[in-house]
Image (tube, rainbow, N blue to C red):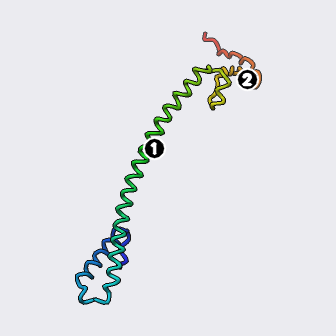
Amino acid sequence: MPRNITTQGETFQDLQQLATSMAANSTEIPHLESPRVQLVTILTQAEALVTQQAALAASRQEASKQLRELLAEARRLGNFLRVGLKQHYGPRSEKLAEFKLQPFRGRKIPKPVEPPFPTEPSPVVTGPKAP
């Protein structure tokens, strides 16, 4: 097999071409017929697996799409239920904490900011009077 082949697709194509060429010249190389048949069998199985892999990828993508849709619907329902719980128990009820909701406990009154040290008023400097 040539060393410049790196992808699975290139390898697959190269081996299929090899098997086809060997089948066309089977009368000249009868001693390699059994390994050639094994190669064809393996390539057939590999082709089936590639097809299965593609189908599973499509199936996985569809499942991911359905999962995203279901989670979006679940989020909407969860938000609706949280609002319903606040409506039922009241926004200040401590019972909301049981549902991992923060009850409203009022706003904290900010403390007035005092300067770090008292400041004295600066003297007013007036300039010389004009004549």
Is 70 left or right of 81, judged from the image as shown?
left
Q: Position of residue 112 (x, y in %)?
A: 71, 20
Q: Which residue is mark 2?
A: 115
Q: Position of residue 92 (x, y in %)?
A: 65, 20
Q: Quadrant of the C terminus?
A: top right
Residue ID at (36%, 64%): 50
Inspect this view and state whether residue 107 appears.
Answer: no
Q: Give the Cα distance between marks 2 and 1.
A: 57 Å
Q: Position of residue 32 (x, y in %)?
A: 32, 87
For disc 2, the neighbor class at 10 Å (few under 14, some 14 to 19, many from 20) is few
Q: Position of residue 20 (x, y in %)?
A: 26, 77
The numbered dot on residue 127 is none
Is 53 left or right of 84, judged from the image as shown?
left
Inspect this view and state whether residue 8 appears.
Answer: yes
Residue ID at (59%, 23%): 86
Q: Which residue is mark 1?
A: 67
Q: Amino acid at mark 2?
A: Pro
Q: Earlier in the sequence, mark 2 or mark 1?
A: 1
Considering every residue shown, the one lying at the far top of the view is 131
Element at label 1: helix
Q: Amino acid at mark 1?
A: Leu
Of residues 123 and 58, the one drawn nearer to the viewer in this rendering: 58
For disc 1, the neighbor class at 10 Å (few under 14, some 14 to 19, many from 20) is few
| Looking at the image, residue 87 lies above or below residue 129 | below
Residue ID at (69%, 15%): 124
Element at label 2: loop
| Looking at the image, residue 107 lies above or below residue 2 | above
Of residues 8 and 19, the one drawn nearer to the viewer in this rendering: 19
Is 123 left or right of 85, judged from the image as shown?
right
**Mark in the foreground, 2 or 1:** 1
- Residue 96 placement: quadrant: top right
